[in-house]
């Protein structure tokens, strides 16, 4: 087996890991969102008075502890938003395992930029 064939197999393995990560994140997000929707339909209320709703991750987590339907739905949507970020994290680990340090460094830089943008995007 030539060096290029081994590298191609490594790239395919990376793509499979990333694909499985994305699929799992979307499936879990969908399941959590559907659970929240079912809770809302069964209880008939969002778990919050009037027009109020959680506006921070901490408030969503507190509502999730008591299974407030709207907090469960928002948790699913939040997981959907985090799935691509998780994909970048998995890519870093995969590139390091493959000893492809240049791509690991590039991906780590993208990951840091994503984290900084989330932190700066808060109100």
Image (cartoon, grey):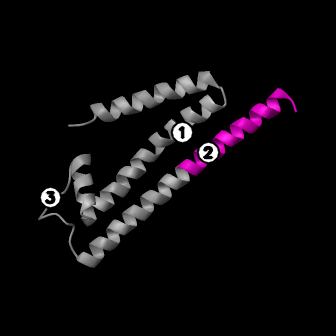
* x 22%, y 55%: residue: 62
Please tell me whether residue 39 belongs to the stretch shown in magenta.
Answer: no
3 or 2: tag closer to the N-terminus: 2
3 or 1: tag closer to the N-terminus: 3
User: Residue 90 shows which numbered tag?
Assistant: 1
Q: Which residue is mark 2?
A: 17
Disc 1 residue crowd, few under 14, some 14–19, many 20+, Cα 10 Å: some
**x and y, in percent, of residue 68 in the image:** 24, 64
Q: What is the secondary structure assignment of the residue under circle 1?
A: helix
Q: Are marks 3 and 1 in contact (CB under 8 Å)?
A: no
- Residue that sits furthest to the bottom in the current view: 42
Quadrant location of the N terminus in the rendered image: top right
Q: What is the secondary structure assignment of the residue under circle 3?
A: loop
The Cα atoms of the two marked residues, 3 and 1, are separated by 36 Å
Q: Which residue is mark 3?
A: 52
Q: Are marks 3 and 2 in contact (CB under 8 Å)?
A: no
The Cα atoms of the two marked residues, 3 and 2, are separated by 40 Å
Q: Are marks 1 and 2 in contact (CB under 8 Å)?
A: yes
**x and y, in percent, of residue 49 in the image:** 12, 64
Q: What are the residue bounds of the magenta stretch?
A: 1-21
């Amino acid at each position: 087996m030539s060096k290029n064939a081994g590298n191609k197999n490594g790239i395919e393995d990376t793509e499979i890991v990333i694909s499985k990560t994305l699929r799992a994140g979307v499936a879990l997000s969908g399941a959590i969102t559907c659970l929240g929707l079912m809770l809302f339909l069964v209880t008939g209320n969002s778990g919050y008075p009037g027009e109020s709703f959680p506006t921070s991750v901490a408030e969503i987590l507190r509502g999730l502890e008591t299974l407030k339907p709207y907090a469960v739905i928002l948790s699913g949507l939040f997981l959907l938003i985090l799935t691509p970020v998780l994909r970048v994290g998995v890519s870093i680990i995969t590139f390091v395992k493959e000893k492809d340090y240049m791509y690991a460094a590039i991906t780590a830089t993208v990951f840091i930029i994503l984290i900084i943008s989330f932190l700066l995007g808060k109100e």
